[in-house]
Structures are given as structure tokens and as C-alpha cells.
Image (spheres, grey):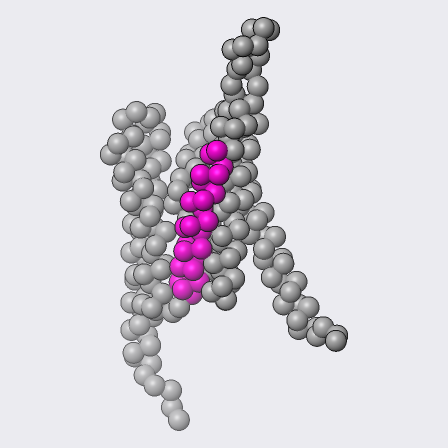
Amino acid sequence: MMISARSTVSLCSRVGAAVAALAAGAVIGALAPLLDGFAGPAGHAAHLVLDAGWSWAALAFCVGLARRSRIESAVLAWLSLPAAVTAYYLTKLAQGAYVTVDLADPAGGTPHADWPGALSKIAVWCVAACLFGPLCGLAGNLARNAGFRGLPFRVLVPLVAIAETTMRLRYEAALQAPATGVTWSVIRLVAVGAIVLLAGCAVVARRSGVQAGPAPR
């Protein structure tokens, strides 16, 4: 049986989407630690953005938003986050964040990579990614709904950003450099503005639909 051209195009589209989701996750996961301490304050701010939980939720959300199928949205989001987690910790490992020494080594404790420590982190966060990734991807898909039907899902990521930055400002800001607190405050302000904008767009779209009335027969 010959495969139709439409089936071939659909298969290629799905494979391409899967590769794109994996690549996006790997890039974001690797950039988060690479930007730390790079290019001054701007690089540090970018690191804080990419290292935050809300930005990883946004990754899965955007992956889901890009697909029409709810199943594809959930599956591709499920792929993207573990890729990001793996790239993140492998990059940290390459930077020397996970180093241990063998005190029984007669050479004086030569430092070497702590693979068990890094792999345990990867395993734990991959489990969390597999749990929350599909939910964020499905939310992204449902955010495609017009008007108020999709509004609760469209404001999900800004709400997560507000909750996370508020918690960090309350409990961590005093222990960090002033620029870190400023970055979190700006993120929270932008998230609030995004919610207001999204809600305003939904209201305008609703009023425009009501004023237009039913289509003439």
C-alpha cells in the first residue's frame, strides 16, 4: 500500500515538531547556566530568567500552543522539559559545578566529576518535568481558544511568574545581590502587565463580537 502524500507530510510535520521541541529544550537548558556571570548584569538577568521555573513552564506552554492537536501538545511538551533538564545539568557538570574528591586517593584527593550527584538531580527533575510538562503543554493548546474560553490558560504562565517571583522576593532577595531583586521585581511587573493586557484583549474581542451581532443570512 502506497503512503499518500498527505500522510507523508503529516509524518514529517510531527517528526519536525518533535525535533524542534527537543532542540528548544536543550538550548534553553544549556543557556540557563552558561549565561550566569557572562556579559555582566545583562547576562546575569538573562540567567535569572532562564533559570526560573516559570520560564520552563513557558517553554512547555509555547510548545503546546504551537500545535493544534491536544495529544501532540502534551507529548511534545513532555519531550521538551526533560531535554531542558538534561542539558541544564550536563552543562553545569561541564562547568565544574558537580565535583568531588576521593579522600582515599593516595595522590591527595584528585577532583573528578560527580556523575552520581548530577545524574540523581537529572532523574529527580526529569520526573517532575514529565509530570508537569504535559499539563503545561495542554494548557498552551487550550489557550488557542478565542475570547474568555482561552483566557484562564493564557494567563497561566504570568500567574506562575508572579507567584514564583513573589516567593523569591520575600525569602531570597535579602540574600542576593541588589540586581537580582530588581530583576525579579521587573519580571513580576511585566507578568502583571501581561495579565492586564490579555484580559483587556479578551474584553475587546468580546465586545467587538457582541457589537457585530449575528452574521446576516
- Image point 72% across, 73% down: which residue? 3
- Image point 35% across, 42% down: which residue? 187
Q: Does residue 95 sit above or below 13 in this rendering?
A: above
- Image point 47% across, 58% down: which residue? 74
Expressed as whole percent of the image width and height from the top left, the position of residue 138 reads 43, 60
Tell me the quarter of the picture where residue 141 sits.
Answer: bottom left
Expressed as whole percent of the image width and height from the top left, the position of residue 126 reads 47, 43
Tell me the quarter of the picture where residue 182 sits.
Answer: top left
- Residue 123 is left or right of residue 13, and the answer is left
Expressed as whole percent of the image width and height from the top left, the position of residue 96 reads 53, 23
Q: Does residue 153 sit above or below 130 in this rendering?
A: below
Say if residue 42 shows up in the picture.
Answer: no
Read off the magenta span. Answer: 120-144
Expressed as whole percent of the image width and height from the top left, the position of residue 199 reads 30, 61
Q: Does residue 154 sit above or below 88 in this rendering?
A: below
- Image point 32% across, 83% down: which residue? 213
- Residue 126 is left or right of residue 179, and the answer is right
